[in-house]
């Protein structure tokens, strides 16, 4: 293991802190908690807006995009706060302890729809923005914890795998549990069912974040450098091209994720003609993510991170073209869909480790670690990406003339092209962005 890196130029190194097996596994629970709320939002909030709250598809898509951009500016603010936090709980853990309950509450509020007309739209915008801000207060510190727990690149890659195992379990839980919970808690009242479902999942997410805070202890942090200006920290970011590449590639990847999760319910019902296929599509995506989390560290250690990710993306593009030919063949569709998303998911699994690598490079380049700020860039990409993906799909619905009470052939074609064609294009964009990352030799 390399020697611990310094926190700021001229400061003493962080205290060695052996990472227990329990802490490594517990860290992955944070992504399980995150996906109980985040995946539910990306997969079902658009449907809740259009088919339960009665908002127009274009209005719902605009809310998803504008609300996410509005709250995304909080990410660098939270990142800077984490970099400057020194408390008896550590630097990142206080946010997990105190902000997680807030996230659970506003998550439940996002699945309510009081009033009518403009009131509904304003409420949706306000609650969606608040749930995004609350997510930042938890998820940015959680992601920034990784380089605070260990400075070993191989361990970080493995822990990124543990994170994605947690994320995959969360995806599976959401795909299997959300609609049954809605039905059992609401009966014929879908609005009440969605609210009850959100209360259950929000509470579970809070408890899981608290477990992470209990079992994962950070290495001792160096003192905050006096006189460090915020503008100087922000100005140093463009110098780190590797970080820029990872953040841009993550943005493209999460736009793709936003399209898949938001579009699954529509594609299942209106293209495959089976509303229950929603669970199967999301489950297939979840299983591909789970399998990817197990094999990605093994593959990328042998191919190199950038090369392995880009090879997987190239194969995914080919397989997505094949999906266009599988209308009316749900079993074959799901099989190819699983393989495509397994290969295209290497970047999701590796991203936290790649960000941690850029933290080490950033310190070499600038004399600053800025874990919170650098992770905030990745968090910004995930947040804006999923919102943009959902918005793009909603606008595709509007372009196709989608109506909840009658789905025309033109609307069905728009759903199919948005659900399959756009993700294939985004794989190429993601691969182009990865060209900026080149730290494999330094972190091997």
Image: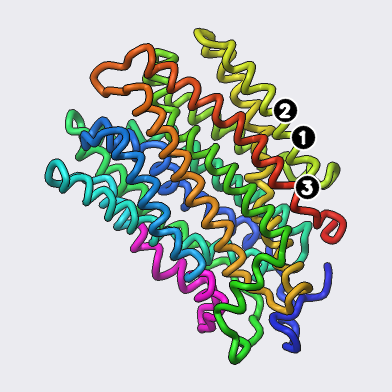
Expressed as whole percent of the image width and height from the top left, the position of residue 321 reads 63, 19
Give the magenta-colored segment's residue range: 78-103
Q: Earlier in the sequence, mark 3 or mark 2?
A: 3
Residue 315 falls within the magenta-colored stretch? no
Q: Are marks 3 and 2 in contact (CB under 8 Å)?
A: no
Expressed as whole percent of the image width and height from the top left, the position of residue 368 reads 69, 77
Magenta region's main secondary structure? helix
Q: Is residue 123 above or below residue 371?
A: above
With 424 as the anchor, is 274 left or right in this view? Answer: left
Frontmost residue, 222 versus 150: 222
Q: Residue at x 16, y 48 (%)?
A: 119
Residue 276 shows up from this direction: yes
Frontmost residue, 323 versus 109: 323
Q: Is residue 165 above or below residue 334?
A: below
Distance, label 1 to label 2, CA atoms, is: 6 Å
Residue 181 shows up from this direction: no
Distance, label 3 to label 1, CA atoms, is: 10 Å
| Pointer 1 residue | 311
Frontmost residue, 320 versus 187: 320
| Pointer 2 residue | 315
Q: Which mark is residue 305?
A: 3
Q: Residue at x 51, y 78 (%)?
A: 89
Q: Are marks 3 and 1 in contact (CB under 8 Å)?
A: no
Q: Are marks 1 and 2 in contact (CB under 8 Å)?
A: yes
Frontmost residue, 178 versus 340: 340
Residue 91 falls within the magenta-colored stretch? yes
Q: Return the residue found at the far bottom.
A: 226
Quadrant location of residue 151? bottom right
Expressed as whole percent of the image width and height from the top left, the position of residue 81 reads 50, 76
């Amino acid at each position: 293991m390399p020697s611990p890196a310094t926190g700021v130029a001229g400061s003493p190194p962080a205290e060695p802190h052996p990472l227990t097996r329990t802490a490594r596994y517990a860290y992955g629970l944070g992504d399980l908690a995150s996906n109980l709320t985040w995946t539910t939002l990306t997969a079902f909030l658009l449907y809740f807006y259009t088919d339960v709250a009665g908002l127009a598809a274009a209005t719902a898509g605009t809310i998803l995009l504008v609300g996410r951009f509005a709250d995304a500016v909080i990410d660098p603010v939270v990142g800077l706060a984490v970099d400057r936090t020194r408390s008896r709980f550590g630097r990142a853990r206080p946010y997990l302890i105190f902000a997680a309950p807030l996230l659970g509450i506003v998550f439940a509020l996002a699945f309510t729809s009081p009033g009518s007309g403009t009131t509904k739209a304003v409420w949706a915008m306000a609650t969606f923005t608040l749930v995004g801000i609350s997510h930042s207060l938890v998820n940015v510190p959680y992601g920034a914890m990784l380089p605070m727990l260990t400075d070993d690149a191989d361990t970080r890659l493995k822990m990124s795998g543990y994170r994605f195992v947690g994320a995959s379990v969360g995806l599976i839980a959401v795909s299997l549990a959300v609609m049954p919970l809605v039905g059992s808690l609401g009966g014929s009242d879908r609005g009440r069912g969605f609210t009850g479902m959100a209360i259950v999942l929000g509470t579970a997410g809070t408890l899981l974040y608290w477990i992470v805070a209990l079992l994962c202890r950070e290495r001792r942090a160096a003192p905050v450098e006096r006189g460090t200006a915020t503008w100087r920290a922000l100005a140093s970011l463009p110098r780190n091209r590797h970080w820029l590449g990872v953040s841009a590639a993550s943005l493209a990847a999460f736009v793709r994720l936003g399209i898949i999760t938001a579009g699954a319910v529509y594609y299942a019902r209106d293209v495959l003609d089976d509303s229950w296929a929603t669970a199967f599509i999301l489950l297939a995506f979840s299983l591909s993510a789970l399998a990817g989390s197990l094999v990605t560290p093994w593959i990328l250690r042998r191919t190199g991170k950038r090369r392995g990710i880009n090879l997987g993306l190239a194969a995914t593009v080919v397989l997505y073209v094949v999906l266009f030919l599988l209308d009316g063949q749900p079993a074959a569709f799901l099989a190819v869909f699983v393989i495509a998303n397994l290969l295209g998911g290497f970047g999701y699994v590796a991203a936290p480790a790649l960000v941690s690598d850029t933290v080490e490079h950033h310190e070499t380049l600038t004399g600053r670690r800025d874990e919170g700020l650098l992770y905030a860039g990745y968090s910004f990409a995930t947040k804006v990406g999923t919102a943009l993906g959902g918005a793009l799909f909603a606008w595709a619905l509007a372009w196709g003339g989608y109506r909840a009470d009658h789905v025309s052939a033109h609307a069905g074609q728009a759903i199919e092209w948005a659900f399959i064609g756009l993700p294939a294009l985004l794989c190429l964009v993601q691969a182009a962005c990865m060209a900026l990352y080149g730290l494999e030799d330094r972190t091997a």
